[in-house]
Amino acid sequence: MILLSVVLFIVSCNKEPEPLSKNSVINGHVSLSDVTEASINVSVIATGPYGSESVITDEDGRFSFVEMGNGTYSLEYNKEGYGTIRQFGIQLFGNDTVTVSNFLLFRKVNEYFGVPNFVSVCSGSGPYYMNPDLTFVCIETTYHGSSIHNFPVMLFMDVSNDVSCNSYVYSCPANLVDYNDEDRFIIYIDMRDLPFNKGEEVFIKGYACNTDEFYYGYLDTNLGIMQYSTLDEKRFSNVISFIMP
């Protein structure tokens, strides 16, 4: 009798959970940051208490999961050439339809782009077209290029020299750039945006990233921090520092 009870207990422990209902639906819509893409066709994976299943969006980006069991689900959005985005905490109670918010996928940075190193940093005026009374962090880089449009570098700052994309106080895109007399890129950061105190040493590191994510990115509610799905942790600059004036 004891042996039988142990066997039944083991079998019950290994048995997959069964949903109380299987009549819920998850609907959604995905867009691409590259509007020249002919069709959306994103892979969406739903993971919940009963395993995972996937669907492909239609050409307009719509998708639907049907006959879903009750429980809490996460969604993962994938498309080749784009960053992966995840959504958590989607709850189905049974006989209900949940429509998730529209998600925007961003194209990854060209694999041939190399993040420049930082040569020097100081505080001073911005580009000629900016208000001369404003003070900027001015970072001279090793980058020589023919265009300053959509410079794909995200900057991360911290009061520790261990600053990284996983350990930082503030992040911002390196979108405000110009050339110096040697045709090197200068990155400008508006001092008014920085959350640091006067006299603090601030360390800066840059990573390859589609900087559009800074403006239209998403908050990972599971981790509680902003996510940059196109950020490449293997492509980064050296660390440089300045004293907050």
Image (cartoon, rainbow, N blue to C red):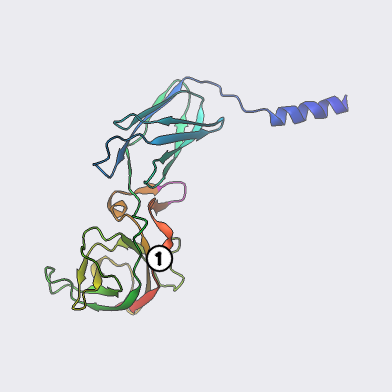
Is 180 within the magenta? no
From the image, give the main secondary structure of the stretch colored magenta: loop
Image position, residue 81 (x, y; %): 37, 46
Q: Which quadrant holds residue 117?
A: bottom left
Image quarter in which the C terminus is found = bottom left
Position of residue 184 relative to residue 1, above or below, is: below
Residue 201 visible from this viewpoint: no
Secondary structure at numbered mark 1: strand
Q: Nearer the viewer, residue 217 or 9?
A: 217
Position of residue 70 relative to residue 30, above or below, is: above
Position of residue 183 relative to residue 107, above or below, is: below
Image position, residue 126 (x, y; %): 18, 72
Q: Disc 1 marks which amino acid?
A: Phe
Image position, residue 180 (x, y; %): 20, 76
Q: Is residue 137 left or right of residue 5?
A: left
Q: Is residue 189 left or right of residue 46?
A: left
Q: Is residue 92 left or right of residue 228?
A: right
Is 221 within the magenta? yes
Residue 5 visible from this viewpoint: yes
In the image, the segment drawn in magenta is 220-224
Position of residue 53 relative to residue 126, above or below, is: above
What residue is at 31 percent from the left and 73 percent from the top? 142
Image position, residue 239 (x, y; %): 40, 73
Q: Which quadrant holds residue 16?
A: top right
Q: Nearer the viewer, residue 81 or 75?
A: 81
- Residue located beneath label 1 in the image: 236
Structural crowding at the residue carrying mark 1, measured as other residues with C-alpha within 10 Å and reported as few (<14), some (14–19) or many (≥20): many
Image quarter in which the N terminus is found = top right
